[in-house]
Amino acid sequence: MKPLNHIILAVDDNTDNLSLLYQTLSEHDYTVLIADSGARALNILQKTAPHLVLLDALMPELDGFATCELMKQSHPDMPIIFMTGLSETEHIVKGLSAGAVDYLVKPLNHEELLARVAVHINNARLTNSTKLALDSTGQHMAAVNPAGQVIWTTDQAQTIIDTFSSKERGLLQSWLKQAGNDDTLEIQHEKTTLIITYVSQQSDASHLLKFKAHNLKLETQTLKNKLKITRREAEVLFWVAKGKTDWEIAQILHISERTVNKHLEQIYRKLEVNNRTAATAKAMVALN
C-alpha cells in the first residue's frame, strides 16, 4: 500500500488515456493530478511538486520532450517517465536526454507501469534523503555537465549556485576545463567568499563539485573574539589567511599598504608569531 501523499501528475492529450491512468493509480492509493497539455502541466508545477510525472511524448503545440526539459529546469530532481508509441532508439534516447528517468511504450502494461512508478518514487526518496544528509554535514554537493549546467544538487549547493552571475557562471565553465581533483575556485561576493572544490569526474563525464560559503562578517567576528584582536586586524588577518598580498588586502579594504603593514605588526605581536604563515595557521585554527 502506497502512502497517500505520493502525488503523480499524468500528462496526455488523450482523455481516455488520462481516465485509465487516473483509475489505475488511484486504486493503488496514489493521489493523481491530470493535465491534457504540456502548458497545463507546467501550470500545475507552479502550484505543487508531484513525486513523479507520467508524460506523453506526442502532444500538439508543446510536445512531451520540450515539456520535460522545461519541467527539469524548475524541478531537477523530479522523476519523469515518458509514455509513448514511439519505440525507436532515437526517440528513447531523446526522451532520456531531455531528463526522463524511464520510457514506457504504449499500449501500457499497467503492472509494469505500477512497478516502475514505485521504483522511481523510492529512488527519488532515497536520493533526497542522501542530499539532506550531505547538507546536514556541510557537504554541499552538485554534479554539473561540462557546460556548467546542474545535473543534480543538494538544496544548499543550489542556493549557492543561484547567486552566481552570468560572469561567474562563465568563470566556472572555464575552470572546469582544466580543474583536477582537490583544485579549488574562489568567487568573491560582497560579504561572502564562495569556495568550489573539484571532487572528481563521473562516468557520464559530469563533474562532482563541493561548495562552501564563507561569510566575511561572521568569520572576521570569530577571529576578533577568539584571538582578541580588533575588527580591522581581524579583516586583515582573514585576507592574509586567504593568501592575499598586502597590496591586494589594501585594495579590498580600501586602505593603504602601509596601514596593512601596521595592522600586521600588531597581529604578529598579539598572536605571538613572527610571519604570515604562523599567523595564518592560528587564524585557520580559530575559524575551524
Image (cartoon, rainbow, N blue to C red):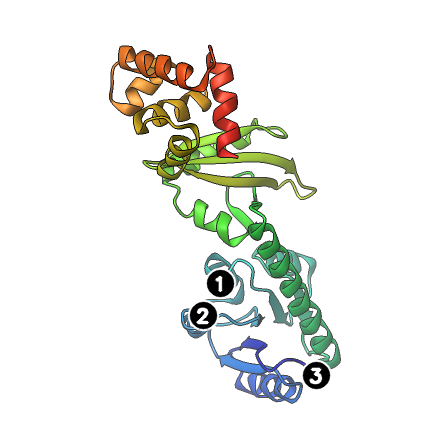
Image coordinates of residue 68 in percent, x first then y, are 52, 63
202 relative position to 49: left or right: right
Precedes in sequence: disc 3 or disc 2: 3
Secondary structure beneath label 3: loop
Tell me the SS state at disc 1: helix
Q: Is label 1 in contact with label 2 (beta carbons under 8 Å)?
A: yes
Local crowd size for mark 1, using a 10 Å CA cut-off: few (<14), some (14–19), many (≥20): many
Q: Position of residue 208 (x, y in %)?
A: 61, 41
Counting residues from the N terminus, which is met first, the one under dot 1 or under dot 2?
2
Q: Amino acid at mark 2?
A: Leu
Q: Label 3, on which residue?
A: 1
Mark 3: amino acid: Met
Gap in angstroms between the C-alphas marked 3 and 1: 28 Å
Above/below status of 153 relative to 187: below
Amino acid type, label 1 = Met
Q: In the structure shown, which secondary structural element does the residue marked by tag 2 occupy?
A: helix
Q: Give the x, y percent position of residue 269.
A: 40, 14
Mark seen at residue 45: 2
> Please, is residue 135 above or below residue 77 in the view?
above
Callout 3: 10 Å neighbours few (<14), some, many (20+)?
few
In three-dimensional space, the C-alpha distance between marks 1 and 2, rounded to whole angstroms, equals 8 Å
